[in-house]
Amino acid sequence: MKKILVLLCLSFFTIAAFGQKAKKAEKSKPFILGEIHELHSKVLGEKRILNIYLPEGYNPADSVKYPVIYLLDGSANEDFIHIVGLVQYNSFEWINIVPKSIVVGIATVDRRRDFTYPTTIEADRKQYPTTGHSDAFISFIGTELQPFIEKKFKTTSSKTLIGQSLGGLLATEILFQNPTLFNKYIIVSPSLWWDNGSLLNKNPEILNASFKQLTDIYISVGKEGLTTTAIPRVMEVDANVLADKIQATKSKTVRVLFDYLPQEDHATIMHQAVSNAFRQFKALKE
């Protein structure tokens, strides 16, 4: 009986030791969300990091092409991960709000430099000395970034731009100055206070009857109140003025949606606004 007990104990400890070794032998594997590409920009004179999400089933060998969603503030520690989550979720077959899409997150280097045009406000120039070079960044998008993506990946002609805060300011500037760079714009809490709202005084091409590209624009703002600038402005008012200005277009191909989200503020609005934009863009097609 004692021999049997000894054998059972030895067997137990052998199995336990084996189990521990097996556990130690297990190796973790990385969870891969996308690809990281480095693009050298001659226009900007620097390398830019691009975080790329490819939809499930993407195969460079087949004939299927995908829309592209370009995301400003697209670093991994900014908006890339949660926007990719929204795109993936809304493209599930049983939800089908967004077509399967490629997401291009443009990692941030200097937001003030890249997302703002020159300002006449002396205090802002002193406080943010690198500002005022959005023209170069817009040129980078049109002449280097988009051609790179279109050559590297299987893309359709559908191009969406997402920008919030200063990114929303840049998205508005592109819409006004280079509207055909994208055919869908998601503009969230745009910092239209920049240069005391001078962008709102422009009369862009999209307001003319001669503008023919089908362009969908979603503008959203939360309960955000006065800006802390030298000349205070109300962000809700500026966003409303922007929407009203575009809605007055004579073009038959420009469609604008305005979404006030009083339950959100400047810090929390991005995720909900982009989700709403996807739903409202789909509704325009129906």
Image (tube, rainbow, N blue to C red):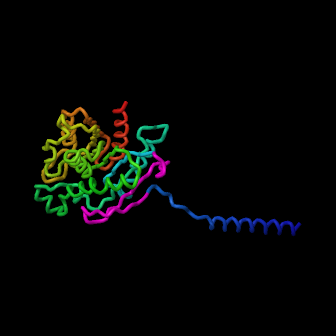
Q: Which residue sits at x=54%, y=61%?
A: 29
Question: Residue 136 lies in magenta, yes or no?
Answer: no
Whether residue 248 is visible to the viewer of this picture, yes or no, is no
**Residue 122: horizontal and vertical position, in percent?**
10, 59
Residue 40 found in image quarter: bottom left
Viewer-nearest residue: 149 or 266: 149
Closer to us: 24 or 70: 70
Report the magenta residues as a range: 35-63
Q: Residue furthest top?
A: 286
Q: Is residue 222 left or right of residue 11?
A: left
Q: Give how far across and how far down residue 218 sits, in percent.
A: 29, 40
How many marks do you count on the picture?
Answer: 0
The residue under the point 33% across, 33% down is 284
- Residue 166 is situated, as x and y percent measured from the top left of the image, at 24, 52
Does the magenta-highlighted stretch encompass residue 42?
Answer: yes
Which quadrant would the N terminus be assigned to in this image? Answer: bottom right
Residue 117 is left or right of residue 21, and the answer is: left
- What x and y, as percent, mark residue 162? 31, 48
Quick check: can you spot residue 23?
Answer: yes
Image quarter hosting the C terminus: top left
The residue at the point 34 percent across, 62 percent down is 39
**Relative horizontal placement of residue 88, taking residue 243 as reference (left or right):** right
Q: Is residue 189 above or below residue 97?
A: below
Q: Nearer the viewer, residue 259 or 52?
A: 52
Residue 153 or 54: which is nearer the viewer? 153
Q: Residue at x 74, y 65 (%)?
A: 15
